[in-house]
Structure formats: structure tokens, C-alpha cells
Amino acid sequence: MKTMDCRDVLANLSCYLDGEGSVELRATLEEHISRCRRCRVVFDTTGRMLKIVTDTAPFEVPLAVSARLYARLEKVLSEP
Amino acid sequence: MQNDEPPNPNVPSEDDLLLVERVLAGDRRAFEPLVRKHERRVFRVALAVLGNIDDSEEAMQETFIKAFRHLDQFRREARFTTWLTRIAVNEAIQKRSTRKNLVPLAEVETAAEQFTPKRYESWKSNPEQLYGKQEIHRIVEVAIQSLPEIYREAFVLRDIEELSAEEAAEALGIKVPALKTRLLRARLMLRESLADKFEEPATLKTKIVHTAVDAGTAVAMRLMRAAGM
């Protein structure tokens, strides 16, 4: 199995978190993570950051902004 | 339209295509549920590109008006959300390009090119439960808003709006590898800025152990002995 340094491993972080990459690549990454504490922390906490952000569903449309959108659309929709 | 009704992200999922067909057949009112369903997405995308609410509001209005007027150009092989998102990104990017105080792109790219993680402590087991719902919203939104715009837009399109890498790259007018590079930076930067709130506070003992483990066994033993562990 090909070994990787931390830099190469980090470059493949997205690929790993998104479930992409070959079986071989994933195995290589997992092997590195199992023995490198720092990379393990970065992989784990980046995955958790993604979950927290998506669970939060950030940025609501402010009510006033929404109201003005509908008011403007009302005009457009009523155009002859 | 009912202006007094709050936007509801959980509008029953009436099929987008069905609504589009109805609008095209002359039932203009069928456009309203489409707006209700997607206003949040459009707003978020505009905000990701523009970074402020006022400009995003204008871009959102323009997006829906444009979508309504050009609905006949929507090709059914694409998802309606993808088509609409692309219009929103275009509107927002156009608006951004009229601004005067643009940070030169090259400058931003270079700054991020050298980005390497700096925080290596693990996170608390359920960090999001330590804060109230509103507080979490604020923490996450501030973190996303403080990303440089090219990273923020890549992150929002991919990780929040769940466009594919190809769709996101196309919407932003960049190549897929560039999109992927920006997404990785965005994720690493966000991780870093959320660490303040979510990290396990390191005790002196864990700091020593971690420094030791990261440095290798021989040093580890020496440090741990010196610390009386």
C-alpha cells in the first residue's frame, strides 16, 4: 500500500468525507488516520462541522425581506 | 399573494415541474408556491455571493422575476432547483461586479493557498447541545459570513444547497478542480473558526500527551516522565 504524508492526506479530505475515491485510496487514508492523531482530529472535526452546519440550516429569509419579495412579485404577476 | 404569511421552508412538496407546467399554461398564481418553496435557497445563494442582506434582497427579487419571465426557457432535463440556483448566482455575481471595493481575487487566492490547519484538539462530544438553537444559528452564520467570498459561495452551493461539484462549478463559472480546491479551503477554514466554540478545552496533561504523541515515542516518554505521568 502506498503511504502518504499529512499534506497528501489533507488534500484528500473532501474526497473522503464525500464518500468518493477508490477503495484503495480510502484504505490508504484510513491507515494514515489510524496512526496520525492530528489528521484524525482534522478529519473527525471537519466531518462534525459539516453535520452541525447542515443540521442548523443557517440563514432564514428575514420576514420583512420576504414580505417585500411577495409585494413586488404580486405586481409582476398581475401585469397584463 | 399573502404577504402576512411567514416563509415556510416545508411547503408541501408539490412537484416543481407540475407547477412550472401550470404557470406556462397560463395559471400565473402557480408561481407563488414555487417561490415559497425556493425563496430560502435563492436568498442563501445570493447572500453567499454578496455577503450582505440588502444586496441579497435585490438579487432575490430579480432572480424570481427573471425566472418567471423566462420560465419557458427552463429545460426539463435539469432540475428546477438547479436552473433557479444558476439564475440566482448569475444575478448575485452581476451585482457584485458593479461594486467598487472589490478585494483583488489573486490576493485572496494566495492567502488561502497556504492554509494549513492550526487547531488539533478534538471537539466535545455533542458541542451543538451546549448552545441554544438561536445561539448555534448565530455561531454558524457568523462563521460562514466571515469566509472570503470565493470560499463562502463554493461552500454554500455544495454543502448547504447540495449542488454537485459540476453544477456548482458551472454556476460559478469556474472549473471543477478549482471548485474542489475552494471547497476544501472553505471547510478547513470553517472548522478552524468553529473550533473556538466546540473544542474540548485542553488540560496541561492532554497538551503534553498530544505534543508528545505528535512528536514521536522517544520524545513522548521523556516529556511524560518529566511531567510525572
Image (spheres, rainbow, N blue to C red):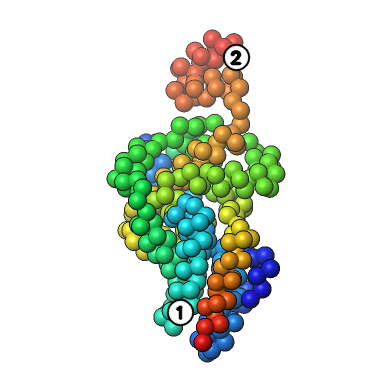
For the residues bearing labels 2 and 1, Cβ distance under 8 angstroms:
no
Tell me where residue B74 sits by quadrant: bottom left
Q: Is residue A22 left or right of residue B160?
A: left
Tell me where residue B92 sits by quadrant: bottom left
Q: Is residue B184 left or right of residue B113?
A: right
| Residue at horizontal 50 percent and vertical 47 percent from the top | B145
Number of numbered discs overlaid on the protein picture: 2
Confirm whether residue B126 shows in the render. Answer: no
Confirm whether residue B177 shows in the render. Answer: yes
Point out which mark residue B229 bears: 2
Q: Earlier in the sequence, mark 2 or mark 1?
A: 1
| Residue at horizontal 42 percent and vertical 45 percent from the top | B148
The chain containing the residue under callout 1 comes to B
Place of residue B78 in the rendered image (x, y in percent of width and height, measured from the top left) = 44, 75
| Residue at horizontal 51 percent and vertical 61 percent from the top | B57
**Which residue is nearer to you in this view: A62 or B141?**
A62
In the displayed structure, A80 sits above or below A35; it is below
Place of residue B120 in the rendered image (x, y in percent of width and height, measured from the top left) = 50, 32
The chain containing the residue under callout 2 comes to B
Three-letter code for the amino acid on which mark 2 is drawn: Met
Q: Is residue B53 left or right of residue B180?
A: right
Identify the residue position indicated by label 1 in the image: B69
| Residue at horizontal 62 percent and vertical 61 percent from the top | A64
Q: Residues within 10 Å of mark 1 (few under 14, many from 20)?
A: few
Q: The N terminus of chain A appears in which quarter of the rendering?
A: top left
Three-letter code for the amino acid on which mark 1 is drawn: Arg
Place of residue A56 in the rendered image (x, y in percent of width and height, measured from the top left) = 62, 52
Point out which mark residue B31 bears: none
Q: Nearer the viewer, mark 2 or mark 1?
A: 1
